[in-house]
Image (tube, helix red, strand yellow):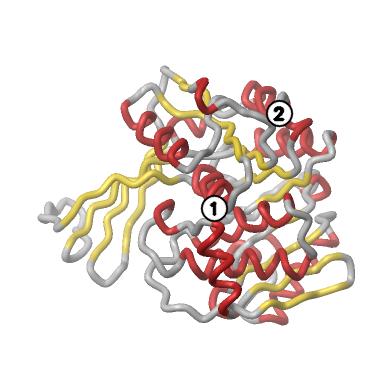
Amino acid sequence: MDPQHSSINPECLVFGSLNLDLVATTPRLPQPGETITGDRFSMVPGGKGANQAVAAARLGVSTAIVGRVGGDNFAEILVESLQSAEVQTDRLLKDPAIGSGVAMITVEQSGENTIAVIPGANGRVDETDVDRLAEVLPTAKVLLLQLEIPLAAVEAAARRAKQAGVTVILDPAPARSDLPDSLYPLLEWITPNETEASQLTGIRVHDLETARQAAMELCRRGVGRAIVKLGAKGVVCCREDEAIAIPAFPVEAVDTVAAGDAFNGAIAAAIVRSFSLKDTLIYGAAAGALSATKAGAQPSLPDRPTLEAFLRKR
């Protein structure tokens, strides 16, 4: 979309969603048919794809995003936020026939919220977008995917990346139970949280042992490495018959909204830098923990100096 942010051999590619979060803070959630007066309103760039791209770029990895924005003013806000993080945006398509993705969020003082997501341009991502992605796959090392765009496009992107020898990471969020069996063997990494792992495997994940069982099941389906994120309980990673558990970094959590996106961006950065499996997991866990200490999605994502200083202290 912008020649000044053209893709010059990006090491990390993100294929996925961009949303503008419209956030209203209210004393309590309104009842059906009720109008109440709110306290604050903010517009926050988000979408799991955009968040992951910012997370990887802030950690010093050359990153490009492929996806769609709409033919509205929101598109400019979304693209400018990415560019300010040095994410390459020239492979975003502006779709004039529809609006950009939007999440309408009402948050009451206790933290309870209601969210209505309008996919907008994200819902129209298709094979033509996969073709744009394929043009830059030969120079990339890793591809990040999520589930806020049509599943057919996600699988097509994973297949093209696998054929190109690019490491594929899927964050299976939002949670769903109907991933096709044909998708799993295309994935080198899958990174569900407890809820997502439970839905994918039918195993109720609530501790390290059930997380290990779910991760092993995902590996049996063909995934190279399965990571289950357990929040304050840490992460469990399985590959073949090996399981590794990494404890969480204790922090004062303020907002966990982008912790998963920070984790995935850091995993991608670690893979680009050829970290060991254990160091990759530690890097991801530290990024997720740091993200939870700040409010907001993209504003909370740590940069490389901050993350490395955090790790040195521990």
Q: How many marks?
A: 2
Q: Residues within 10 Å of mark 1 (few under 14, many from 20)?
A: few
Q: Position of residue 312 (x, y in %)?
A: 60, 74
Q: Is residue 90 above or below residue 298?
A: above
Q: Secondary structure at mark 2?
A: loop
Q: Position of residue 129 (x, y in %)?
A: 62, 25
Instruction: Name which quarter of the figure residue 240 lies in.
Output: bottom right
Residue in the image at 47% along x and 78% along y: 251
Q: Is residue 188 left or right of residue 150?
A: right
Q: Nearer the viewer, residue 54 or 260?
A: 54
Residue in the image at 54% along x and 78% along y: 232
Q: Position of residue 211 (x, y in %)?
A: 69, 74
Task: Say if mark 2 contacts mark 1, CB within 8 Å.
Answer: no
Instruction: Name which quarter of the figure residue 183 lies in.
Output: top right
Residue in the image at 60% along x and 35% along y: 64
Q: Nearer the viewer, residue 153 or 160?
A: 160
In the displayed image of the protein, which residue is found farthest to the right? 241
Name the residue type under label 1. Answer: Pro
Q: Position of residue 15 (x, y in %)?
A: 61, 37
Q: Nearer the viewer, residue 286 or 313?
A: 313
User: For residue 174, which numbered disc appears in the image?
Assistant: 1
Q: Nearer the viewer, residue 303 or 93?
A: 303
Q: CA distance from mark 2 to mark 1?
A: 26 Å
Residue at numbered disc 2:
136
Name the residue type under label 2. Answer: Val
